[in-house]
Image: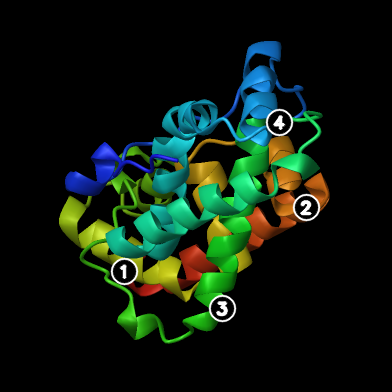
Amino acid sequence: MIMTEPASRKASKPPDAPAPASAEAPTPPEEMELVRRARRGDLPAYDELVRRYQERIYATVYHMTANHEDANDLAQEAFIKAFQALRSFKGGSSFYTWIYRIAVNKTINFLKQRRNKSQMSLDDLDFNAEHDPDLVALVSEKTPRREVGLAELQEKLNAAMLRLSEPHRLVVTLHDVQGLSHEEIAEIMDCNIGTVRSRLFYARQQLQAYLSDYLK
């Protein structure tokens, strides 16, 4: 299995991770054939699956960990675990959604083991604040005549994001940063849509509270 270093690992920030076409859509026949071949020990077939989704998985994990090395390690561990568990994949959802969920669960467990948030690299975190309409609107609505420095805004957002619990940080990352729908997030997080919406609402309220002094 060839686990190549993602291009985003070499750059200053990771690429945005496009959302899967549909969290409920079954695996396309051509992709399912790659899965079948990989189950039989065909490593080039699995390498092709890795090639298709490595950048997206890496970008998501990076937004959760704020660290290039951790994101690279966790993404590769997720693909290794997926390879070992291929027989459990039935094709009812897309392979991307399935591997996404493995990566997310590994990342949550990793973050639970590393509770000391001071070890996280705020300078390395790219929350893409300038491309996040919800959080940009949050600032612009509160300060319509105030010129907001992007660097200062991003630093405040980084710190606020790291104060959220893992589930709340994850739902904001998946929805507001990665652009996944409520339905896709519910499947990845193994919860109902109502839980996703309530977590997203609470997380945004918490971010607003954490940023309240800055927005005055």
Q: Residue at x 48, y 64 (%)?
A: 208
Number of the label disc, if any, that sits on residue 69: none
Outermost front residue: 41
Outermost top residue: 30
Q: Looking at the figure, which quarter contains the N terminus?
A: top left
Q: Which is more toward the observer, 58 or 5?
A: 5
Which residue matches tag 3?
112
Give me the C-alpha separation between circle 3 and circle 1.
Answer: 29 Å
Pointer 3 or 2: first along the chain: 3
Give me the C-alpha separation between circle 2 and circle 1.
Answer: 35 Å
Which residue matches tag 2?
190
Pointer 2 or 1: first along the chain: 2
Pointer 4 or 1: first along the chain: 4
Give me the C-alpha separation between circle 3 and circle 2.
Answer: 18 Å
Marks 3 & 1, CB-CB < 8 Å contact = no
- Determine the secondary structure under disc 2: loop
- The three-letter amino acid code for the residue at tag 4 is Ala
Which residue matches tag 4?
23
Which residue matches tag 1?
214
Q: Is residue 123 left or right of residue 78?
A: left
Pointer 4 or 3: first along the chain: 4
Q: Looking at the figure, which quarter contains the C terminus?
A: bottom left
The 10 Å Cα crowd at callout 1, few under 14, some 14 to 19, many 20 or more, is some
Give me the C-alpha separation between circle 4 and circle 2.
Answer: 12 Å
